[in-house]
Image: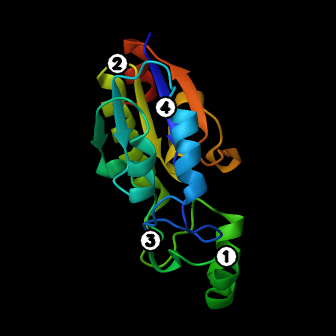
Amino acid sequence: MPKLYVVRHAEPEIIGVLLGRTDPPLSAAGRRAAREKLAGLPHVERVYTSPLLRCEQTAAQIDAPVLSVENLCEIQLGEWDGLRWTEIEQRYPELAARKVKDWFGVTPPGGEHWESFAARVNSALRMAMEAHVPAAIVAHVAVNAVIAQALTGGDPAAFNQPFCGVLEFEFGKADVERLCPK
């Protein structure tokens, strides 16, 4: 059975804010970590990556052809993109309080609804799994939470993955239909 490695991008130059579609490059520490952790990743025939710079720079450290996939972009955070949580609480106190109580049910102004986001991520996961080759997906924490939920049934709210963290899964042809229905 082929393996699928699910990688969170390495540390970006900007941390401490909700990045969403904000597109910083990797920090020096992030570039170093990506080289050290990913250059020796076991056999991978294809890398699927978010087109955001922090993911593309991370994916470049894996020795395999890289395919940029728009559906692997981080969730669109709208007006909250690039802000610290304290700034969001100050500017949008009522909405921030609702978000804390129902993280997946409340959408920031101009942002992407969680269900739409999860559907597009699952379509990218299905594409990667249908190729049925050892592969890596290099994406973002929310993207990888959706992927982990599809592959393990885990709660995306409990998902945590450090920068440049690598999760490993095995899957067969039957798993594609079961895990990623059309």
The residue identified by callout 3 is 111
Q: Residues within 10 Å of mark 3 (few under 14, many from 20)?
A: some
Q: CA distance from mark 3 to mark 2?
A: 34 Å
Labels 3 & 1 near each other (Cβ < 8 A): no
> Which of marks 2 and 3 precedes in the sequence?
3
The residue identified by callout 2 is 133
The residue identified by callout 4 is 39
Residue type (three-letter) at the residue carrying disc 4:
Ala
Q: CA distance from mark 4 to mark 3?
A: 35 Å
Residue type (three-letter) at the residue carrying disc 1:
Trp
Labels 2 & 1 near each other (Cβ < 8 A): no
Tag nearer the camera, 4 or 3 = 4
Q: Position of residue 181 (x, y in %)?
A: 37, 30
Residue drawn 36% across the image and 25% down it: 129
Labels 1 & 4 near each other (Cβ < 8 A): no
The residue identified by callout 1 is 85
Element carrying mark 4: loop
Image position of 8 with respect to 174: above or below:
below
Residue type (three-letter) at the residue carrying disc 3:
Gly
Tag nearer the camera, 2 or 1 = 2
Determine the residue located farthest toward the bottom in the rendered image: 91
Residue drawn 52% across the image and 40% down it: 35
